Image (spheres, rainbow, N blue to C red):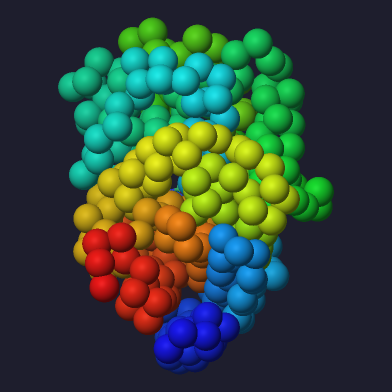
Amino acid sequence: MTDLQDVVDSVYQDLASRIGEGKLADYIPELATVDPKQFGLALCTVDGQVHTSGDADTSFSIQSISKVFTLTLALGKIGDGLWKRVGREPSGNAFNSIVQLEQEKGKPRNPFINAGAIAVADVVLAGHLPKEAIGEIVQFIRYLADDETIAIDHDVARSETNTGYRNVALANFMRSFGNLNHPAEHVLGVYFHHCAIAMSCRQLAHAGLYLASAGRNPLSGGSVVSSGRARRINALMLMCGHYDGSGDFAYRVGLPGKSGVGGGILAIAPGKASIAAWSPGLNENGNSLLGSAALELLAQRTGWSVFGQ
Ligand code: GLN
């Protein structure tokens, strides 16, 4: 099958009977109110074609997918100096785990687990008020997606601010080791708000296109990062983007990907396309159940796995 719209439609159709499977992320109360019977797909190719199916224009909470964009910003600010504060190894633990943080003296294993993304938020915050840092992140994502309507869902941000006890613990723990330069509540203000950004599959696929296209966004023509940096962010997504389910995602899908507990996944087929899948029901690792299944079928049908056909 070569027509990409047919591929996207066939993936949607083959999974349509399973819409609603999985478990909502109810530890953030506002996310537990989302209708689980939703499923969207969007694919943007590096030559500018866009293919969608299902609920591709419904906004959802991107949650940890935002960590790809904050990592990109932080690398832009301090370059490889970031790796003194955050590692580049898969954690093999849950996204909100604290155990390795003690063993590794406050240095998170990678920028995509919560502790790592909180350290990244601390870097983005440097020299700014929390409001300004949040504004910078939103502006960056709007630029990537070429869409000024993208915004924070303040109900989700408030919900997580009120209940994010684990993240409060992770931030204070890192601060005790000297790996946060700002008060934990300021850093978490930035973190909770970027996790609460709402986007549709179409917007997300568009925003991720620079990673598929050697650091340039072919739709807007703008250069976002160097090709080497895009390649390395893809490597981190492949190794760490699905937490303790990263190995399984690489095995089944074979593409760099980043999931969020809102049920979204951004996957990158380098040199080919940026793909967003969304369905709110999660598997046991906190990754979208149907989203993972959709990307598995899509990678099979396109032959796009980075490991070969
Ligand atoms: N904001 C969420 C949290 O901190 C992000 C987790 C995720 O999407 N995996 O728990």
Of residues 298 and 92, the one nearer the viewer is 298
Q: Which quadrant of the figure contains the C terminus?
A: bottom left
Q: Position of residue 21 (x, y in %)?
A: 42, 78
Q: Position of residue 198 (x, y in %)?
A: 67, 53
Give the side of residue 266 with respect to residue 243, left or right: right
Task: Note whether residue 35 is visible.
Answer: no
Q: Position of residue 30 (x, y in %)?
A: 60, 55
Q: Residue at x 77, y 52 (%)?
A: 147
Taking the view exactly as shown, the residue that stands out farthest to the left is 103
Q: Which quadrant of the figure contains the N terminus?
A: bottom left
Of residues 56 and 184, the one nearer the viewer is 56
Q: Position of residue 237 (x, y in %)?
A: 37, 47
Give the side of residue 33 with respect to residue 283, left or right: right
Task: Tell me where residue 191 sits by quadrant.
Answer: top right
Task: Note whether residue 175 is visible.
Answer: yes
Task: Tell me where residue 253 sits by quadrant.
Answer: bottom left
In the rendered picture of this protein, how many numbered marks are placed on residues?
A: 0
Q: Tell me if residue 296 comes above or below residue 141 in the rendering.
A: below
Q: Residue at x 73, y 37 (%)?
A: 139
Q: Residue at x 25, y 67 (%)?
A: 308
Q: Tell me if residue 296 comes above or below residue 161 in the rendering.
A: below
Of residues 86 and 131, the one nearer the viewer is 86
